[in-house]
Image: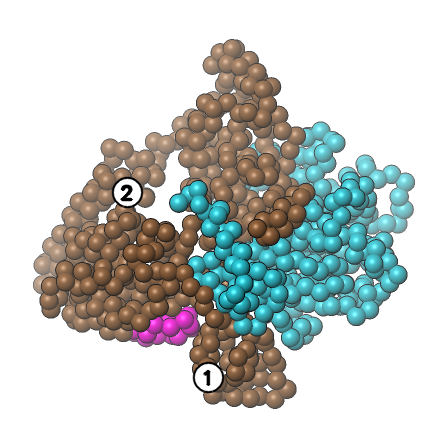
Amino acid sequence: MAESDDEYVQDISDDEVEAHQVTRSAGTGSRATGQGSRGAGWEVTRTWENVVEGADGTISSTVEGLLEAGKRKRLLKDTTPLQRGIIRHLLLVLDLSTAMSEKDLRPSRYLLTLRYTTAFIAEFFEQNPISQLGIIGTRDGLALTISPLSGNPNDHISNMQKLFEQEPKGQPSLQNALDMARAALFHAPAHTTREVLVLFGSLLSSDPDDIHATISALVSSHITVTIIGLAAQVAICLTLATRTNPLLPPSQTYNVALNEAHYRDLLMRATTPPTTSHSTTEDSGVKSSLLMMGFPSRIVDPSPTLCACHSRPTRGGYLCSRCSSKVCSLPTQCPACGLTLILSTHLARSYHHLFPLRNWREVSWARASVSSQKVCFGCQAPFPERPASLRRQSISGGQNHDRMSLATSESQLHPPKAAHISNANKDGVSESGRYECENCRRFFCIDCDVFAHEVVHNCPGCQSREGVLSFQTRKGGE
Amino acid sequence: MNAPPLSLLTIILDTNPHAWALLTPTLPLSAAIANLLVFINAHLAFNNSNKVAIIASHTQRAEFLYPVPSQDDSLQANGSAHNGAQNDLDGDAKMVDSDEGSGTAAGDDANHYRPFRHIQTILLSAISKLYKTTSSESLTPTTSIAGALTLALTYINKQSIALSTTTSSKTNADTFVAPSDPNLIQPATLNPRILILSVSGDLAHQYIPIMNTIFACQRLTIPIDICKIAGDSVFLQQASDATHGTYIALTHPRGLLQYLMLGFLPDQSSRKYLVPPTAVGVDFRAACFCHRKVVDVGFVCSICLSSKSGLSTVLCWNYSVRRRKAPHV
């Protein structure tokens, strides 16, 4: 028994090799392309080959460059404002079969999935406060509802806690799970998205019927399926992902997690609302409409009264703006009149998806030297001076070269094209440590760059610029 | 770390000249700044390593009042000043500061504790410079609170990064590229909070940027305290409520110092043992995008999430979104 188990493991890892090579050759593996390990074996990332001695004989400059590149890697994403499906209906399908007890992801696929899913639920509602989430599990060839479609993260998390005490067993059934998901999403209104996210650890699916018929049914009911594999690429999953997302490349809809961190990244990527373009809106049935919502104010009663949602005596709460029944937490649906009750802050939470902050540009030394800005506008940290070693390097390269760079610095404001391109090549790291917002033309340091794009979603410069308020007034009046 | 966690107090001072002119009979700006300085001194006296930053939220721009980049000096002097700030983290800031103070501010009272005097001179000169550079056409009744909040957050972020990397700060270059992964920041060591002294209302045009900063604060567990001296703003109430800060609307602006000392001096860790003043009724109603009216029941567009007061209105916000998006689609 034990031997056969070992062989089984071996098979998986072989498949894994193939799967990763396939994704690499297609140029889709986000991890693989990022690390530039050309020609190396798939498990060996030769990070030391990236380290080159600087002009002064130390590797400190390269190390610093790598650190900055790592910080900025996640930043350089598409910042075009797109129409996104903010109100989502997502069903999470968890594989609970024996394949999940593998320990290739620590502590085990099963426990890691449960832990990440709990984090995912919190993050999902953080990013999509007015969306609905449901959780389905599949084991023993059956699909079972773990947590029904609802908008309350606490319900989901408490339902997830029960799974921690159970063991993965049997075979998964993709078809049963998808059918159940389709039934749950059947009543989702047309202005929302219908999504299924599958976390699939097995290499097989034990189905009662033809799964291709199920896939066709999913396509016709405009349900999109994205899959995160834990073991290796499986042909049916790829078919499923590509057929339900005809407009997206497979790299965005079906990925295999390489390690724990990659798994988390893939899962958290699903918290960002999917884009819906005009061309797809007609086909997929997603259309804009106006929803009636109530914005209740909080009240504090002098004595406890029963809430309408749980019939528990509470003092604080919110009164429905239409029928004045008291509910304890938001967002929710009024139990009496069915009005969606939310806080305006919940709506505002999604705004940064709709109006993303544009990427900032790297600044060349030539451009940095003509600017009078010596400190980061955001945090007041001083920028590095143009290092002497860099000057020496350019001198050793040829006296002419140095003179040329001086000449370009005098030409001001128009950085040479070549310098720009060479900057862009280096993983978006600015040689001068400065990053420039193209709107307000102010320089920022890497820390502020990362912080502004990932946490605040505001540009400190644009928000504190002369005339910005009158500009916004004009825009609002349009 | 055995030392008590240092707290970084970032004060955002609303310096809208209009609003302060209206307040002159009860609380002139000079008196408010004098009160604020006493409050800052008290904060610094609490713990040797406590830090403060002051940001002006002016009519159309936000600016650092303290610490200021010394632009007229050479970069070398600037760098040393900032190294002084870095040393601050080790707790020997007082010495560095006092050296600087004796160099720059001459003829001061010898009985005045030098770090206090240092802040006072910098703050007063920065404020007078701010008002000198204000042109009459830039005077609007609004204030750029979103910009000030964003600046405060970037500053807090940088300080917590600098604190979490206990590596030595030898040169400028080293302090700048101090290795720091955003995931490695330990906010436990730095105890940041933001205090807004607000005198003007009407912030509807900055709704989205303000909300972005509020969510950032919520995520980083930075409380936003509001000291509302005049005017009224729904957003600031929501800000303090969402970040578990204190909201006090002054009934007697003349007693500003007492409000500051009793309401805002305790930091996050000591507030757990106190009963903070809380605003009971928080107005959570949304403003509609077409009329800027505050509504109870509204209609929300499922795609752009803007709320509208009635179906018959022109969907101005929606149109502007579509128009801006057009070239990309």
Q: Which residue is drawn at 51% across and 39% down?
A: A360
Q: Which residue is drawn at 43% across and 59% down?
A: B303
The residue where tag 1 is placed is: A336
In the depicted structure, whether residue A146 falls above or below residue B168: below
User: Which image quadrant: the N terminus of chain A?
Assistant: bottom left
Q: Is residue B72 among the parts visible in the rendering?
A: yes
- Mark-to-mark CA distance, 1 and 2: 50 Å
Which chain contains the residue that carries disc 1? A
A428 is within the stretch colored magenta: no
Residue type, numbered disc 2: Thr
Q: Percent from the top left, x then y, of residue B33?
A: 81, 54
Q: Which label's residue is closer to the chain start, 1 or 2?
A: 2
In the depicted structure, whether residue B37 falls above or below residue B227: above
Q: Percent from the top left, x then y, of residue A319?
A: 55, 80
Which chain contains the residue that carries disc 2? A
In the depicted structure, whether residue A27 falls above or below residue A262: above
Look at the image and give the residue range highlighted in magenta.
A146-165
Q: Residue at x 72, y 68 (%)?
A: B248
Give the cyan chain's letter: B
Give the brown chain's letter: A
| Nearer to me, A215 or A227 | A215
Mark 2 surroundings: few (<14), some (14-19) or many (≥20) residues within 10 A: some
Badge 1 marks a residue whose secondary structure is: loop
